[in-house]
């Protein structure tokens, strides 16, 4: 393991924004020193901090910004069973290229991940690559049956479960799952979607897209069908969000709401957060928003690349998400990285790759526009997900993540906040080359990533 002195850096995490130096001994941060240490002779002064002055590397950050590596709470690596779309090696390569040191994987694989043994096997396989940490989630219902929660009783070492890709339709089953998770201290990650509204919306959308009548009346009808589809799809999220909040309150459960995309859902979450302080009993709620939902809207156009679930929403919804970043309602930025083959995408598969564009899009759309500060961005992408997942205790066996503090793991990312570049998915490390930000001009580029003190990108 390396001993490194990072100098000539802008040190940034959720609370620090200062010129400085950062010292790494083996796999952990030894010290963070604020001040102008731009020269090599300045860096050499810190060699006395180490147990030995032998084999200490000096790394000139060239006035770039050194941050804690990012943590993504919503990722699909398609492993096992769908490795034509992604596998552990390609997924981890994409993660470190995007500046991520920890990713949380969804269980909608083939077969579905519904046991601790399977989850830990995937985590162990991923660990062998020594690139980033993987946390594998388990399904809420066994094998996505929608009815059976018996497997939750046997879960060990699992911090979060989810039915991602769809919701648990039965409120009674969801309440049962939440009650069990309350006892076991497991977070329930909610994909909020009422299937009855979604099914109806699909019929309206199908009719609109298949409409061959190009007359004025025909186009008016097609537009009306699309509007009705969008209304029902928004209702599907809003109603399910309120339902899951109510169930979590009753169960005293900790829930995390995935890929929030509507104004009404954000408002419901904001109210629930305020209530949580008074309700007590274990109920708590956090939420995430994706870059595609805060950077794009439904008016971006009908494009096969933009098909995603939940869909892109109205500009009113997007503005509500931006406000929620400002007022603190949003806790986490997650990518919902969901790579597909071109054939699957052409057949309407929802989702796209996002790990390698997340930071740049967030910096461009949120920081450069003045919506949030770079410290708040670090909080959203590092400190908060670490706290939610219980990864912020530097005295834990596995080490802490999410901040630049003495004793935390040396999971680091170096970014150039001024570099302008054009998104080109052909250069992605992921197998999934479909990206909604193709050809977008962005500001801020990941230039290097370290995992436990070792450079992995």
Image (tube, rainbow, N blue to C red):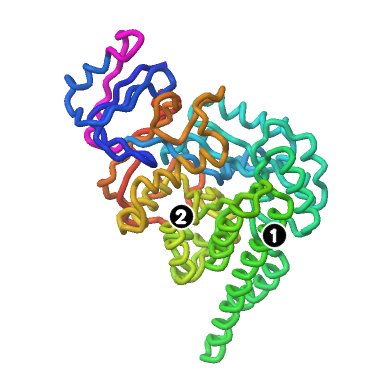
Q: Nearer the viewer, residue 396 or 194?
A: 396
Q: What SS does tag 2 mark? A: loop
Q: Quadrant of residue 88?
A: top right
Figure check: 111 above or below 232: above
Figure check: 42 above or below 64: above
Q: Is 327 in the magenta?
A: no
Instruction: Tell me which segment is drawn in magenta.
Output: 48-65
Q: What SS does tag 1 mark? A: helix
Figure check: 376 above or below 294: above
Figure check: 339 above or below 49: below
Location of the N terminus by quadrant is top left
- x, y (%) of residue 325? 44, 57
Location of the C terminus by quadrant is top left
Res 61 visible: yes
- x, y (%) of residue 452? 45, 25
Residue drawn at x 69%, y 56% is 167
Q: Quadrant of residue 427?
A: top left
Q: Nearer the viewer, residue 5 or 403?
A: 403
In the image, taking residue 308 as reference, residue 138 lies left or right, namely right
Outermost residue toward the front?
278
- x, y (%) of residue 226? 57, 77
Residue on which the image places disc 2: 328
Residue on which the image places disc 1: 246
Between the residue at mark 1 and the residue at mark 2, the CA separation in whole angstroms equals 21 Å
Q: Is 50 in the magenta?
A: yes
Residue drawn at x 43%, y 61% is 322
- x, y (%) of residue 239? 66, 67
**Crowding near the residue tagged with mark 2, few <14, some 14–19, many ≥20 C-alpha atoms within 10 Å:** few
Q: Nearer the viewer, residue 235 or 285?
A: 285
In the image, taking residue 373 as reference, residue 128 lies left or right, namely right
């Amino acid at each position: 393991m390396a001993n490194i002195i990072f100098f000539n850096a802008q040190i940034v995490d959720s609370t620090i924004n200062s010129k400085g130096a950062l010292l790494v001994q083996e796999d952990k941060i030894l010290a963070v020193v604020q001040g102008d240490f731009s020269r090599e002779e300045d860096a050499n002064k810190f060699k006395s901090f180490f147990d030995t002055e032998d084999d200490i590397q000096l790394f000139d950050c060239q006035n770039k910004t050194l941050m804690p590596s990012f943590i993504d709470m919503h990722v699909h690596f398609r492993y096992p069973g769908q490795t034509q779309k992604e596998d552990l090696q390609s997924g981890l390569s994409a993660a470190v290229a995007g500046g991520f040191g920890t990713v949380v994987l969804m269980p909608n694989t083939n077969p579905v991940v519904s046991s601790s043994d399977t989850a830990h096997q995937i985590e162990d396989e991923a660990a062998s690559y020594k690139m980033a940490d993987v946390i594998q989630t388990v399904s809420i219902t066994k094998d996505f049956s929608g009815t059976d929660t018996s497997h939750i009783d046997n879960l060990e070492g699992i911090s979060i479960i989810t039915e991602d890709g769809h919701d648990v339709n039965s409120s009674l089953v969801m309440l049962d799952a939440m009650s069990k998770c309350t006892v076991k201290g497991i977070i329930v990650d909610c994909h909020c979607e009422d299937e009855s509204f979604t099914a109806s919306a699909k019929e309206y959308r199908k009719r609109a897209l298949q409409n061959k009548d190009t007359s004025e009346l025909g186009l008016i009808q097609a537009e009306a069908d699309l509007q009705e589809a969008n209304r029902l799809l928004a209702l599907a999220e809003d109603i399910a969000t309120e339902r899951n909040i109510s169930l979590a309150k009753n169960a005293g459960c900790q829930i995390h709401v995935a890929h929030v995309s509507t104004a009404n859902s954000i408002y419901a979450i904001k109210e629930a957060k305020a209530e949580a302080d008074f309700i007590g009993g274990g109920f708590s709620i956090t939420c995430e928003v994706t870059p595609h939902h805060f950077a794009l809207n439904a008016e971006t156009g009908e494009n096969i690349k933009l098909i995603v679930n939940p869909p892109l929403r109205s500009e009113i919804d997007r503005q509500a998400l931006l406000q929620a970043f400002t007022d603190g309602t949003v806790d986490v930025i997650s990518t919902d990285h969901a790579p597909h083959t071109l054939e699957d995408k052409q057949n309407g598969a929802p989702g796209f790759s996002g790990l390698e564009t997340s930071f740049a899009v967030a910096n461009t759309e949120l920081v450069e526009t003045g919506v949030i500060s770079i410290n708040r961005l670090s909080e959203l992408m590092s400190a908060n997900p670490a706290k939610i997942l219980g990864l912020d205790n530097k005295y834990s066996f596995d080490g802490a993540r999410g901040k630049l503090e003495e004793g935390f793991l040396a999971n680091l990312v170096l970014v150039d906040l001024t570099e302008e570049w054009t998104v080109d998915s052909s250069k992605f490390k992921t197998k999934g080359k479909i990206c909604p930000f193709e050809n977008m001009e962005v500001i801020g580029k990941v230039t290097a990533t370290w995992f436990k003190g070792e450079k992995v990108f």
